[in-house]
Image (spheres, grey):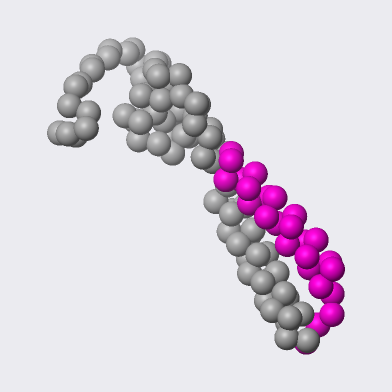
Amino acid sequence: MNRSRPKQIVIRANQKEFERIKGRVEKSKLTQNEYLLRSVLDKEIIVIEGMKDLTIELKRIGNNLNQLTRAVHEGKANCSKELSEINEEMKEVWQLLRSLTQRRV
């Protein structure tokens, strides 16, 4: 039993409703309990397709950017202005992604 949520609610659904709920729960990547609670309490449920792939790619780009920045600081490359601009843009992208994934209503 979940100690922070000791109360239980049982709902009944027909097969079509049940399948629809299950599909939405799977799509949301939340537990069924969390999905239903958010739905009933009018909390926003955000599903962003491909977020994992996007995050992995952004991490790779950020890693490469850090390596280039290090090379500029060590005097091995000379494109600091462009790297600064790219770095600022990457920060903006990360902030937008965080705001999308952490929004709560």
Q: Relative to 91, does residue 62 appear above or below in the rendering?
A: below
Whether residue 86 sits left or right of residue 13 in the image: it is right
| Quadrant in which residue 30 is drawn | top left
Q: Is 94 a magenta residue? A: yes
Q: Identify the residue shown where x is 84% and y is 80%.
A: 78
Whether residue 7 sits left or right of residue 33 in the image: it is left
| Residue 27 pos. (x, y %) | 48, 34
Q: Identify the residue shown where x is 76% and y is 80%.
A: 72
Whether residue 27 sits left or right of residue 82 in the image: it is left
Work out which quarter of the rendered image holds the N terminus and state it. top left
Q: Relative to 95, does residue 64 appear above or below in the rendering?
A: below
| Residue 5 pos. (x, y %) | 22, 28
Whether residue 31 sits left or right of residue 2 in the image: it is right
| Quadrant in which residue 63 is drawn | bottom right
Q: Relative to 35, does residue 64 appear above or below in the rendering?
A: below
Q: Can residue 105 be seen in this view?
A: yes
Give the magenta range: 76-100
| Residue 87 pos. (x, y %) | 73, 62
| Residue 57 pos. (x, y %) | 63, 59
Q: Identify the residue shown where x is 79% and y is 68%.
A: 83
Number of numbered tags placed on the structure image: 0
